Image: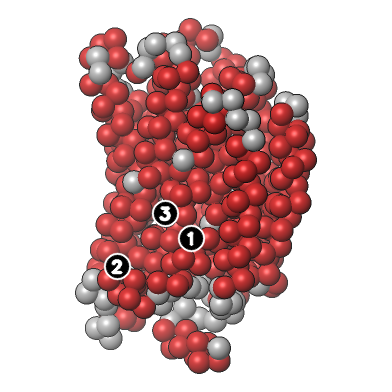
């Protein structure tokens, strides 16, 4: 059962984040199709539409987690992936601006918001669902495997860009080639939905259901009893969310501002995401032995040390050096925050707590990164990447100092109360 659960949750993460990322990776083509004026404004609007999907994630997290903490994890776990598939297919089949005018842009934005609602519930649900099934000694490994799989979804998206750029001409990619990944991603998502039909409810939720201690209004209980944990959780995500969005932003940024070929940029982007995925998994495994708090602080400190040389390498167009300098600290944050979030909250409000913290963190630190960096670049301020890396690293380090380590403890209220009594 555990092996099947690992496979289903990881596959779902791959598919969800493949669907979620391809809009940014094909931003230039989409801007020409839906905002046909060949100017910086069209691309900037496309970044805004991409960011809109991230900004609505907290709302999706609250909606999904409310019912997840009320009715159970598995029902919402299935709904989120079918919602993402429908939205992604809609984008892939959407008529262009030339066909239906400004309505094309409106529909694109609406479908992107639907994607955001879906992923806002999917990732927290997957983390909670998996963590409540696994033993405490493997919690960091399994939850980091889900995030590593999400990054693999970004690898798959970037690889799709490499393949399409190699097989199609610029005209073909512009006319119809960009639609291929959206249609493919939606079909794979439907497959993921059917694979999830046989999963069972988590033991932790089954226990509180039997004890009739399910929260009536989870988000209300969350803010009454876990307000501090929410702030800590948001901060723990800062560095990881910033760096993942920064890596995604490298493709359009390097193409437009560093005059590098899209084919070579896609290759570097793919390699970065693959390295991040593998190192994320390693970091999660190590956190089961070394503890999440210690590793998150170390990751933030390392990011501070490499921020300036990484920024200098970026200005020189040395993307490989940027990757070598930043991958380790980025992977430490990306592999450790998941289990740390799950351990911050009790079973009654765990789904809601993880969803609120994770989605606000991604929204604040990751959602607007592409838009802000592009806007600053167009305004002539080129130190945006440096500023974001340093700020996010400091916040992550500070948050790790305020978190309570629960490594090795079972995810039930009794264990949480015993630990709290010791502190």
Characterize the local packing of mark 2: few (<14), some (14-19) or many (20 or more) Cα atoms within 10 angstroms. Answer: many
Q: Which mark is residue 359?
A: 3
Could you tell me which secondary element the residue under label 1 belongs to?
A: helix
Q: Residue at 47% across / 84% down in the picture?
A: 416
Q: Which one is earlier in the sequence, the residue at label 1 or at label 3? A: 1
Who comes first in sequence, dot 2 or dot 1?
2
Contact (CB < 8 A) between labels 2 and 1?
A: no
Question: Please, is residue 328 above or below residue 346 in the view?
Answer: above
Q: Is residue 281 visible?
A: no
Q: Which residue position is annotated with label 2? A: 219
Q: x, y percentage for residue 295?
A: 68, 65
Nearest-to-viewer mark from 1 and 3: 1
For the point 76% across and 51% down, which residue is it?
305
Name the quadrant containing residue 248: top right
Colour scheme used in the picture? secondary structure
Q: In this view of the protein, which residue sits in the foreground, 199 or 298?
A: 298
**C-alpha distance separating marks 2 and 1:** 16 Å
In the image, residue 221 sits, relative to residue 25, either above or below, namely below
Give the spatial CA distance, label 1 vs label 3: 8 Å
Q: Position of residue 60 (x, y in %)?
A: 31, 52
């Amino acid at each position: 059962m555990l092996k099947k659960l690992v496979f289903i949750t990881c596959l779902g993460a791959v598919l969800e984040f493949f669907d979620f990322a391809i809009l940014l990776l094909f931003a230039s083509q989409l801007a020409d199709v839906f905002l046909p004026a060949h100017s910086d404004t069209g691309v900037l609007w496309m970044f805004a539409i991409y960011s809109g999907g991230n900004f609505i994630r907290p709302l999706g997290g609250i909606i999904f987690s409310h019912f997840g903490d009320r009715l159970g994890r598995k029902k919402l776990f299935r709904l989120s992936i079918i919602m993402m598939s429908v939205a992604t297919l809609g984008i892939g089949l959407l008529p262009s601006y030339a066909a239906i005018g400004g309505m094309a842009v409106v529909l694109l934005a609406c479908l992107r918001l639907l994607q955001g609602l879906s992923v806002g519930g999917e990732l927290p649900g997957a983390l909670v669902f998996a963590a409540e099934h696994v033993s405490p000694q493997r919690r960091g490994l399994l939850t980091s495997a889900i995030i590593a799989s999400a990054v693999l979804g970004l690898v798959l998206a970037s690889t799709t860009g490499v393949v399409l750029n190699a097989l199609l001409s610029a005209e073909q990619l512009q006319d119809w080639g960009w639609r291929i990944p959206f249609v493919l991603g939606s079909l794979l998502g439907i497959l993921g939905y059917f694979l999830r039909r046989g999963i069972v409810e988590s033991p932790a939720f089954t226990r509180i259901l039997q004890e009739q201690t399910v929260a009536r209004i989870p988000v209300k209980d969350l803010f009454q009893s876990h307000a501090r944990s929410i702030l800590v959780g948001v901060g723990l995500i800062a560095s990881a969310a910033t760096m993942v969005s920064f890596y995604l932003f490298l493709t359009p940024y390097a193409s437009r501002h560093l005059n590098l070929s899209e084919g070579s940029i896609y290759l570097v982007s793919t390699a970065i995401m693959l390295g991040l995925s593998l190192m994320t998994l390693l970091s999660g495994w190590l956190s089961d032995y070394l503890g999440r708090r210690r590793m998150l602080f170390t990751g933030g400190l390392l990011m501070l040390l490499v921020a300036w040389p990484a920024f200098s390498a970026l200005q020189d167009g040395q993307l490989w050096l940027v990757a070598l300098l930043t991958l380790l600290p980025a992977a430490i944050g990306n592999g450790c925050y998941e289990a740390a979030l799950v351990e911050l909250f009790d079973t009654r409000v765990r789904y809601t707590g993880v969803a609120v913290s994770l989605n606000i963190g991604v929204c604040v630190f990751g959602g607007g990164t592409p838009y802000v960096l592009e806007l600053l670049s167009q305004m002539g301020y080129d130190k945006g990447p440096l500023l974001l890396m340093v700020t996010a690293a400091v916040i992550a380090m500070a948050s790790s100092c305020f978190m309570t380590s629960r490594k090795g403890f079972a995810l039930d209220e009794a264990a949480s109360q015993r630990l709290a009594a010791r502190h």
